[in-house]
Image (cartoon, grey):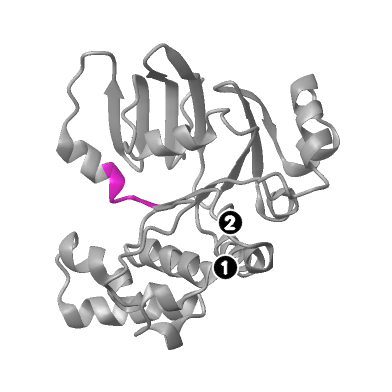
Amino acid sequence: MLMNDNAIIHVENLHKWFGKLHVLKGVSFSVSPKEVMVLIGRSGSGKSTLLRCLNFLEEPTAGTISVAGDSITTAPGVKLDPKKILAIRLKMGMVFQEFNLFPHMTALGNVIEGLVTVKKMSQDEAIAMGEKYLSKVGLFEKRDVFPIRLSGGQKQRIAIARSLAMEPQVMLFDEPTSALDPELIGEVLDVMKQLAYEGTTMMIVTHEMSFANDVADRIIYVDHGEIVEQGEPEKIFNHPSDDRTRVFLRTFLHTDQSD
């Protein structure tokens, strides 16, 4: 795959093995600035592993990952430089299926923790930044509330604010609505739609097909650790070229209930 000179993310021949299980099989792609890329596919197809490899929450077995000018190439037996990993992580925000909030901290405390501990921001600066992003996700009034008093949708919006406050160049979302009750999904998707409209570069793993159709610049269908096909939503959803994509969409396209 040729390098896209304008890409903010470039992945080349990425492999991930878990023991004898080959989860990612030579995946290559680029993401342009302000692009919203949505990964779809069956559970266990490697989508979440791919996101986790991008910020080295899982260490890739082999391949090259480049993010906004920082690049790491790995292979079996290669020891990776922690400073290079940190440089890439600081350029990415990640929102998980589970919210991973600190239960002993308020909403604001959760949002500013990384600003104080990682970015070494002063408390006053961090609070101002935290309040800005709580407002952005519509939860300023919950700044002093602890997670136990928040709904699942509110917790996930706090998690999004926490990632945004670090001002990453790319946002990664790993099935951010899969742990939510159906009536709470919309409030999280609305925040993500707003980010998309504002030009936030995003990679999103989701089973919410109508949402993917609305916000994606490009859909990638992943199956058994390989990119089967990719294209604009209209092409993928209405004119898929691969039988595997067609079978998947026949099951999922009109349901949005696959979790």
Q: Earlier in the sequence, mark 2 or mark 1?
A: 2
Q: Is residue 5 visible?
A: no
Decide: is 165 above or below 57.
Answer: below
Q: Nearer the viewer, residue 80 or 250?
A: 250
Q: Position of residue 28 (x, y in %)?
A: 50, 24
**Up/down of 205 relative to 53, above or below:** below
- Write down the residue under mark 1: 191
Tag 1, which secondary structure?
helix
Q: Amino acid at mark 1?
A: Val
Name the residue: 18% across, 68% down.
116
Question: Is 97 displayed left or right of 109 in the figure?
Answer: right
The label on residue 135 is none
Residue at the extreme front of the image, as rendered: 148
Query: In whole angstroms, how far apart are the C-alphas of marks 2 and 1?
Result: 12 Å
Q: Disc 2 marks which amino acid?
A: Thr
Residue 154 as seen in the image, left or right of residue 187: left
The magenta span reads: 88-93
- What number is the disc on residue 177? 2
Tell me if residue 92 is in the magenta stretch: yes
Q: Give the crowd class for mark 1: few <14, some 14-19, many >=20 residues within 10 Å.
A: some
- Determine if residue 46 is in view: yes
Q: Picture coordinates of residue 235 (x, y %)?
A: 79, 36
